[in-house]
Image: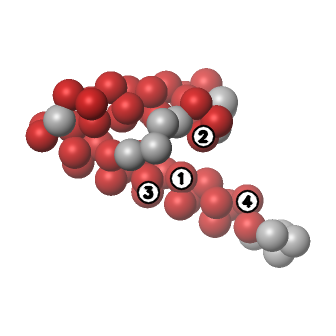
């Protein structure tokens, strides 16, 4: 975690998790709600603290 590029790597991983969730939207209403929450948190800069386990 002390590596200078760690924050960029963490941001990419976070984006990948949101993209995966977006693929689940068509099959589950629960996924759609969580996807909207995650996209909103990325837009506002909140981060993952409001994300629910899935």
Residue for badge 4: 7
For label 3, the residue is: 16
Cβ atoms at labels 2 and 1 below 8 Å apart: yes
What percent of the width, then of the height, locates residue 47? 64, 38
Secondary element under disc 3, as helix, strand or loop, is helix
Q: Quadrant of residue 4?
A: bottom right
Q: Answer yes or no: do the residues labelled 1 and 4 have beta carbons within 8 Å?
A: no
| Left or right side of 10 for 2 | right
Numbered disc total: 4
Q: Farthest front residue?
A: 53
Q: Earlier in the sequence, mark 2 or mark 3?
A: 3
Does 1 sit left or right of 24 as displayed?
right
In the rendered structure, which disc, 2 or 1, sits on the residue that comes first in sequence? Answer: 1
Which callout, 4 or 3, points at the residue further toward the start of the chain?
Answer: 4
| Secondary element type, mark 4 | helix
Q: CA distance from mark 3 to mark 1?
A: 5 Å
**Residue 48: image tag:** 2
Q: In the rendered image, which residue does mark 1 sit on?
A: 14
């Amino acid at each position: 975690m002390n590596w200078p590029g760690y924050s960029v790597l963490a941001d990419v991983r976070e984006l990948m998790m949101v993209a995966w969730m977006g693929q689940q939207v068509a099959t589950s209403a629960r996924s759609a709600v969580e996807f909207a929450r995650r996209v909103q948190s990325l837009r506002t800069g909140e981060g993952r603290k409001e994300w629910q386990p899935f």
